[in-house]
Image: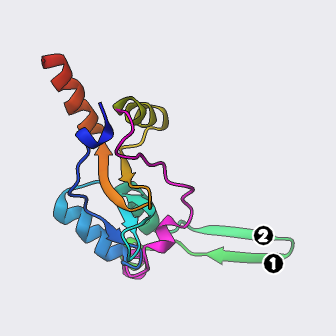
């Protein structure tokens, strides 16, 4: 079975210049846990999950840094202050630490998707064409539904 047979093609994406707030609104509105990030040509530039966004808006804890006689103090940040400040930042600040995003192509076998999801504990994998444009997405649920269908048949 090929990825194209069970991938979702109505992919909800976020633009790379979106704000964190806009992306949070997208996740909540569509009741999803993550989205591929694309440029103006719909080419994949990253992926962001609900967990990435939660970690990003999490307030800073109180901390003291001592760099050989220079002492820096960061006071504890309140949640509301963190939300006001960080939700207006561009999405690129959240995804800048991501390494290369694991992707699939529509012609690849279902077994490859299953192996990636199992090995790396990903919840979703973007499906891209030869130009790097997002054409679908595969989630754990998609794989489980397909496995269940195979078992039933």
Image quadrant of residue 111?
Answer: top left
Residue 66 is tagged as 2
Name the dominant secondary structure of the magenta segment.
loop
Query: Residue drawn at (18%, 61%), measured in percent from left and top?
Result: 30
| Residue situated in front as seen by the camera: 119 or 3 | 3
- In the image, taking residue 4 as reference, residue 89 lies left or right, namely right
- In the image, taking residue 41 as reference, residue 65 lies left or right, namely right
Do the residues under discs 1 and 2 have CB atoms within 8 angstroms?
yes
| Residue situated in front as seen by the camera: 58 or 117 | 117
Q: Is residue 69 above or below residue 117?
A: below
Query: Residue drawn at (43%, 73%), measured in percent from left and top?
Result: 91
- Can residue 6 be seen here? The reply is no
Magenta run includes residue 39: no
Image quadrant of residue 62?
Answer: bottom right
Q: Is residue 2 above or below residue 150?
A: below
Circle 2: element type: strand
Spot occupied by residue 89 in the image (x, y as percentages of width and height):
43, 80
Query: Residue drawn at (31%, 70%), measured in percent from left and top?
Result: 23
Residue 70 is tagged as 1
- For the magenta stretch, what is the residue range? 82-109
Characterize the local packing of mark 1: few (<14), some (14-19) or many (20 or more) Cα atoms within 10 angstroms: few
Spot occupied by residue 143 in the image (x, y as percentages of width and height):
28, 34
| Residue situated in front as seen by the camera: 90 or 88 | 90
Spot occupied by residue 1 in the image (x, y as percentages of width and height):
29, 30
């Amino acid at each position: 079975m090929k990825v194209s047979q069970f991938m979702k093609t109505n992919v909800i994406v976020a633009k790379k210049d979106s704000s964190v707030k806009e992306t949070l609104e997208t996740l909540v509105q569509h009741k999803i846990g993550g989205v591929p990030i694309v440029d103006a040509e719909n080419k994949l530039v990253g992926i962001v999950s609900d967990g990435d966004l939660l970690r990003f808006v999490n307030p800073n804890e109180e901390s003291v840094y001592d760099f050989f006689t220079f002492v820096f103090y960061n006071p504890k940040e309140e949640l509301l202050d963190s939300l006001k400040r960080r939700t207006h930042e561009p999405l690129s600040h959240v995804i800048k630490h991501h390494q290369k995003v694991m992707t699939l192509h529509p012609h690849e076998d279902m077994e490859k998707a299953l192996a990636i999801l199992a090995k790396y504990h990903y919840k979703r994998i973007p499906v891209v064409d030869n130009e790097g444009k997002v054409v679908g997405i595969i989630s754990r649920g998609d794989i489980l539904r397909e496995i269940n269908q195979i078992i039933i048949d």
